[in-house]
Image (cartoon, rainbow, N blue to C red):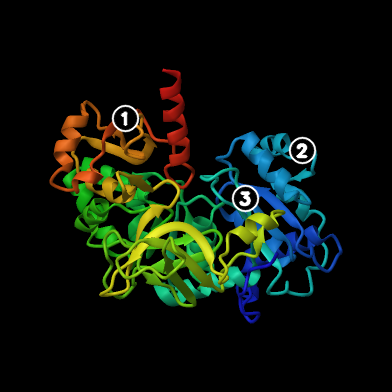
Amino acid sequence: MLHGSSPPSLSLSPLLERLRTRGALAATTDELAAALCGGRPSLEGAPVAFLIPPGAELLRVLLAVLAAGGMAVPLSPLHTQPELAFIIANANPRLVIATPELAALARAAAGGRPVVEPNALRLQAAPPPATAPPANAPAILLYTSGTTGRPKGVILSHAAVAATLSSLEQAWGWRADDRLLHVLPLHHTHGLIVALLGALWAGATLSFLPFDAEQVWDRLGQVTVFMGVPTMYAKLIDAYRAASPDRRAAWTAGARALRLFTSGSAALPAPLLHAFHDATGHTILERYGMTEIGMALSNRYDGPRVAGAVGVPLPGVQVDIVGDDEQPAADGQPGELRVRTSQLFTGYLGDDAATAASFDAAGRFRTGDTGTRDAADGVIRLLGRTSVDVLKSGGYKISALEIEAALREHPDIADLAVVGLPDPTLTWGDLVTACVVPRAGATLTLDALKAFARDRLAVYKIPRALRVLDALPRNAMGKIQKKQLVAALTAGEESS
């Protein structure tokens, strides 16, 4: 079942042609593409998986698969062998390409499928493919993070990816003289499409760096764009506060030279946005997207950026907010975000039923996220995932993200998540529960937390339970795995 609706004029061919002018990169890309085709005109959408650390080698392989007409399946070195085995079995790639240091892991997960190293492919070079892949051909297969079950393979066409890149170039002012410092994982939309391909689409340059807060601060003066997730920005602020005055001054000067900082993949707490602005003079641009829909919303590049909001629809995107009655929600009232866009995915690999269920009767993608639209400026604010962030307690619908934003101001809280646990009295519905990681040496009690919250939250939003934890479960993008957290807490209560 196909749902992608990108205009056929959009494709990745301009990107591939532009990169063919870049010397050694172009030569090795064409060589790899020819080797992958093995004398055939095209791979005709066949999946090719690769397990390669971030860097130039991964970029060459990715571009070669796209040029050869294959469907690129990026695998993460952060994943375990069972996680990789699930993805490889689901994608059923023609082969798995792995660098020497990851080849053993790839073979253990490949289920008998061929595993080759990039250098071995280059020895089989033949003339490069003669024709560009069709715009509606599959380009990339990305796997969802699995926060709502086993990961699903999301098929993105050449046209859908190109629509994302074109929209972001227009919205964020990408320029050929931009320099991106790339620190994100490359098996998700954020790192692979928004950051990596976004820079290349505009003809910009980029450098890869494994995330380390102090190293990032030291490098900021050499680049113009930085993209991160809230966890990274929190670590940057922690490093900044711990640094000497001279070093802070140097870091501030370097950061001021950038033109754009963006944040995505999870909600950016307002206190963190303000702290970063105090340190650098920059207001981080927060945006919203999903693997299935590309990038849908963004704060304005050249206009006000609203703390706690994800902005307005990007070019070519329509976002509706729909209430429980399937009618449009009034301004200020909560509802599910439904999206139409030329960036839409083609479908979930091998799962037509899940693909069909993800669209409503009007053909809009059901994001599963609840939000509101401000009447004055049309800015959309997220209340969270409908399944885990919108709690129903005492007859109220409560945003876990709103509670988290208020509690993050507590000086003794290093990290937290608010979830709904089963209410043992069976009277409240969800028991609003604060799961807190204290700062070193701090002690937190429920009474103290309630007292802190009273001046910041309505009484029905104040947590009724507290769980003090050593750490919160997060995925590779720093997003808290709330379903996993709730399952662990519930299992612990049942066994106690």
In the current view of this chain or complex, which residue is farthest to the front?
427
Q: Could you give the CA–CA distance between mark 3 and mark 2, rounded to whole angstroms? A: 19 Å
Nearest to the observer: residue 341 or residue 453:
453
Q: Which residue is mark 2?
A: 111
Q: Is residue 322 above or below residue 117?
A: below
| Label 2: which secondary element | loop
Q: Could you give the CA–CA distance between mark 1 and mark 2, rounded to whole angstroms? A: 41 Å
In the current view of this chain or complex, which residue is farthest to the top?
496
Circle 2: residue type: Gly
Circle 1: residue type: Arg
Nearest to the observer: residue 48 or residue 318:
318
Q: Nearer the viewer, mark 1 or mark 2?
A: 1
Q: Residue at x 19, y 56 (%)?
A: 278
Q: Which of the numbered marks, if any, corresponds to residue 152?
A: 3
Image location (x, y in percent) of residue 259: 33, 68
Check disc 1: other Cα within 10 Å, few if <14, some if 14-19, many if 20+: some
